[in-house]
Amino acid sequence: MKRIYLKDLETHLNHEITLQGFVDNIRDLQYVQFIILRDITEKVQITIEKNEENKKLNEIVSNLTNESTIKVVGRLLANSKVKLRGMELLPSEIIVTSKSLEELPFNFKNNDTALIDTKLDYRFIDLRNEKNTLIFKIQSCMIEAMRSYLYQENFIEINTPKIIGTASESGSEVFELKYFNQKAYLAQSPQFYKQMAMASGLEKIFEVAPAFRAENSNTNRHATEFTSFDLEFSYINSFEDVMSFEEDLLIAGFTAVKNQYGEQIKTLFNKEVIIPTKPFPRLKLNEVYQALADNYGYQIPKEDAGDLNSEAEKLTGKLALKKYGHEFIFITDYSFKKRPFYHMRKEGVPQGYDLIWRGCEITTGAQREHRYEILKKQAQEKGLDKDVKFYLEFFKYGCPPHGGFGLGVNRLTMLMLGITIKEAMFIFRGPNRLNP
Ligand code: AMO
């Protein structure tokens, strides 16, 4: 059976068809009954007159509840009196495929009134809200466009292990687990394996997959499990190549989202999708510090020196708009003390960057140190050389110069729509949320 989406009904007028969906609303009047049927794409009215001939159908509708799912066979007719799309289905058969309880845990159609925890507890109902459904259509569109771009550019999609023997991002917390008789960890990023692919000669790879961080923080931008869009490519000349590639990739993604969903995003989220122009502005960390001091009287706290914190990121976003009229800004020249050991350094300066969009970090990228002796020394300096012994092996037998980045998909969606990370994830995972 080929399923008919409600958005495509125009082509089925005057035909007998079978429709399936959720019961969005029921009106049981003196002489007539109306059901509004809903699927992922649209809604349509089903009209059942109350008479002897329809007795069986009338009884089914009388006992029907909102949010039940039904299968309806009937004739689709144009009717200018019907407000919803000027058409109605006159059914000959209604089958209740699943009956919903009368009382829902909250009103998902007006979900601004419900507590976020109630919505997350009943996420399967929360996602029936039109706005929430749209979030995942948009995220899906963005990822598809970026994926297509990478395929065009000859990237190979890979899957790296998520159960690993060594923490990959020493700066952030790691989940430990029991792996038979030894300890294992949940991958914080695919970093080591992206680079292994370079040593394997795959040249250009990417992965869209979960990353795990045992960060015990309840912010609107952190999750303990998130989707990371990671890529790595060989034979670069500097991290400039990586930044430039990210610009093109984001432009491809944003263009697709704007074309397909720009209007709906404006209507439902009151946000404009602005396709960024190349080149995005670039500032060195010291220049950022100076500009934040000059423009906002902001001084980075001692403990964050050499890096940006969330307050500084927010102000940097403001600065990018004010000074360059751009929503994005690359920050480079962080302190090596605050950057991972695998970033290449030039005169002690890490050859990497963070990308800030609308005042929030969405990406870290870099040229990697691919020269075995230097890499080993940098690992030693951070006290990691024993832990990453297997990784250091990748660089002993020939490895091209390379670089790449990791982009947080959920942060991207969150910033695009002006929502929190909890809403931008199909299922949110945080320190206090392990269910559903
Ligand atoms: P980093 O640790 O900066 O870099 O992570 C890359 C991007 O992942 C997203 N992100 C998060 N999103 C939601 N919740 C979190 N707890 C969280 N932590 C990180 C952010 C961030 O910019 N291996 C490097 C990348 C690379 O150099 O290729 C890495 O993991 O958007």
Image (cartoon, grey):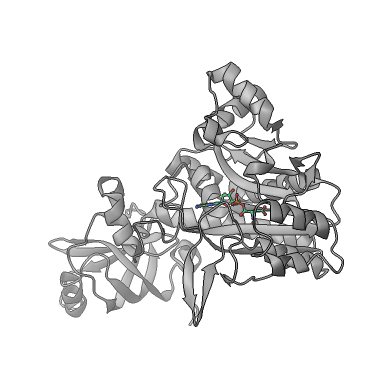
What residue occupies the far left of the structure in this picture?
A: 30
Examine the image and state in which quarter residue 22 appears: bottom left
Q: Residue at x 52, y 30 (%)?
A: 301
Front position in the image: 353 or 16: 353
Q: Is residue 285 above or below residue 43?
A: above
Q: Residue at x 47, y 46 (%)?
A: 221
- Residue 134 or residue 435, whichever sits in front: 435
Q: Is residue 19 left or right of residue 99?
A: right
Q: Position of residue 124 (x, y in %)?
A: 34, 64
292 on left or right of 285: left
Residue at image location 80% in from the left, 54% down from the top: 374
Q: Is residue 399 left or right of residue 11?
A: right
Asked whether residue 128 is in view, the answer is yes
Q: Is residue 418 above or below residue 141?
A: above
Estimate the x, y position of residue 219 in percent, counting from the top left.
Answer: 42, 45
Q: Position of residue 202 (x, y in %)?
A: 80, 68
Looking at the image, residue 115 lies above or below residue 17: above
Q: Quadrant of the C terminus?
A: bottom left
Residue 155 visible in the picture:
no
Asked which quadrant contains residue 104, the reply is bottom left
User: Which of these two is toward me, 217 or 53?
Assistant: 217
